[in-house]
Amino acid sequence: IESLSKIELTRMKNLFLLRHAKSSWENAALGDFDRPLSKRGISNAILLSKYIQKQSISFDLVISSPSERTQSTLDLVLSSLDPIPTTTLKESLYHASASSLSQLIKEQNDEINNLLVIGHNPGLHALTESLTNESIVKFPTCAFAKITNFNHWKDIDAGILNLESLIIPKELKHD
């Protein structure tokens, strides 16, 4: 059994990065942190939720910025998952830089195989480019990236990661 758990620990990891859905600017009195989702943002988050369910994607852990728009995106995206994954809100994710995001990811336990990080630009865009050496023109709201080809969270900056997919709301079908 001991050798089996070592094999389990070295399973291929999947890093999922999600930029919050489109926020509303209707209430000018609200600060940036407290802005809710717009109608389009809600619609896009629901579409992404359906995509995640259809693709049978699951997460062992979700780490999210605590802003209103990221939490609302999180609630909508995870609403169709069963079971709902463990979620941690991290104040440091609110407008985190690519290097801060990278450091947070590297600190994760290798028992976690599928990690979802929900946050903001420009950090998520820069992180995706730096981890995968891919040039991404745009990382729009509700963009969902899957990064693969590594076995340990501490190795995410080894220069070998693949951007397996980058799903943007325009690509998702409206029912």
Image (cartoon, rainbow, N blue to C red):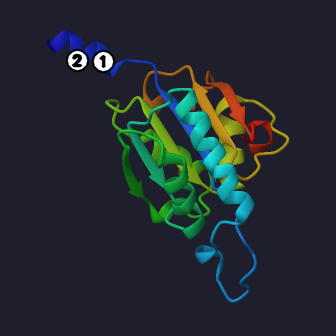
The residue type indicated by label 2 comes to: Ser
Q: Is residue 78 left or right of residue 45?
A: left
Quadrant in which residue 17 is drawn: top right
Q: Is residue 19 left or right of residue 40?
A: left
* Quadrant showing the C terminus: top right
- Residue 147: % across, % down: 60, 29
* Residue under label 1: 8
Above or below — where is 30 with respect to 47?
A: below
Instruction: Specify few, some or many for label 1: CA neighbours under 10 Å numbering under 14, 14-19, or 20 or more.
Output: some
Q: Residue furthest front?
A: 175
Distance between the Cα atoms at labels 2 and 1? 5 Å
Instruction: Specify few, some or many for label 2: CA neighbours under 10 Å numbering under 14, 14-19, or 20 or more.
Output: few
* Residue under label 2: 5
Residue placed at 61% from the left, 24% from the top? 161
Residue placed at 56% from the left, 37% from the top? 16
Which of the two residues, 146 or 101, is positioned nearer the viewer here? 146
Q: SS class of the residue under badge 2?
A: helix
Q: In this view, does 157 lie to the left or right of 112?
A: right
Quadrant in which residue 166 is drawn: top right
The residue type indicated by label 1 comes to: Glu
* Quadrant showing the N terminus: top left
- Residue 30: % across, % down: 65, 84
Q: Do the residues labelled 2 and 1 touch (CB within 8 Å)?
A: yes
Above or below — where is 101 with respect to 28?
A: above
Above or below — where is 112 with respect to 107?
A: above
